[in-house]
Image (cartoon, rainbow, N blue to C red):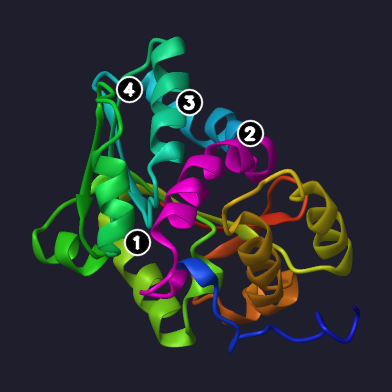
Amino acid sequence: MDLLLRQRATGATEIMDLPDCDPQALDNTYRQFAAVNRALAGWRRLYVRELRPFLAASARPGTLLDIGSGGGDLAVMLARWAARDHVGLDITGIDPDPRAAAFALQRPAMPGVSFRQAHSSELVQEGRQYDFVISNHVLHHLDHGQLLELLAHSEILAGQAALHNDLRRSTVAYALFSVAALPFRHSFIRADGLTSIRRSYTRPELISTAPPGWDVRSGSAFHQVLAYPRG
């Protein structure tokens, strides 16, 4: 396994990214992401540490852009936490994949949350800006040019900070997820999750890839955050 994970598997493709993948299994994957992200991605910690202090001190509702929002579960989860804390937060989730955007748009309406099929370049062209720009498990999907483009767009779109949360490649993460994902059936969660770990960065790799102004912070177990703080 060490040999399998020694280098990023940049040529590996996740099943859900294939245009002809099973649509029912894809829908199941979007649904099951909610449990995976809630349990493993570490966004509660990021919300408390990075988002809530600004929202609590702000005289207006904060704004947040979720790039590559997939099925929309993270946007909804953040909105629920903000509502529970009685802080204002308006969230826009975007995804260029029409299948992901369609799934998110079919979710029950959630106050303060909207979704659209779009690429971050479109929002830059529209002159949009948000207090926070985030993504979850997106970085490892991108080639080098796409990654730098995402970060450049994030610098333009984020008024306070950009937080790109992603997996951190390791043999332990691969072994544990291989077992932990066994209950997720009739979806791509396990197969694609293992591919995602193989495609993800180690901390030194991400540090060497990030442009000036960005820093790599520790996230939850087997995660790391590529952050661009303003000021």
Element at label 4: loop
Q: Amino acid at mark 1?
A: Ser
Q: Which residue in the structure is indicated by mark 3?
A: 52
Q: Amino acid at mark 2?
A: Arg
Q: Amino acid at mark 3?
A: Arg
Q: CA distance from mark 3 to mark 2?
A: 10 Å
Q: CA distance from mark 4 to mark 1?
A: 21 Å
- Residues at badges 4 and 1 in contact (C-beta under 8 Å)? no
Q: Callout 4: 10 Å neighbours few (<14), some, many (20+)?
A: few
Disc 4 versus disc 1: nearer the observer: 1
Residue 229 seen by the camera: no
- Residues at badges 4 and 2 in contact (C-beta under 8 Å)? no
Q: Position of residue 10 (x, y in %)?
A: 60, 86
Question: Which of the 4 image quadrants contains residue 132?
Answer: top left
Q: Which residue in the structure is indicated by mark 2?
A: 45
Q: Is the N terminus in the top left, top right, bottom left or bottom right quadrant?
A: bottom right
Question: N-terminal of the two: label 3 or label 2?
Answer: 2
Residue 143 seen by the camera: yes
- Residue drawn at x 41%, y 51% as measured from the top left: 230
Q: Callout 3: 10 Å neighbours few (<14), some, many (20+)?
A: some
Whether 55 is drawn above or below 227: the answer is: above
Question: N-terminal of the two: label 1 or label 3?
Answer: 3
- Residues at badges 1 and 3 in contact (C-beta under 8 Å)? no
The magenta-colored residue range is 17-42
Q: Which residue in the structure is indicated by mark 4?
A: 58
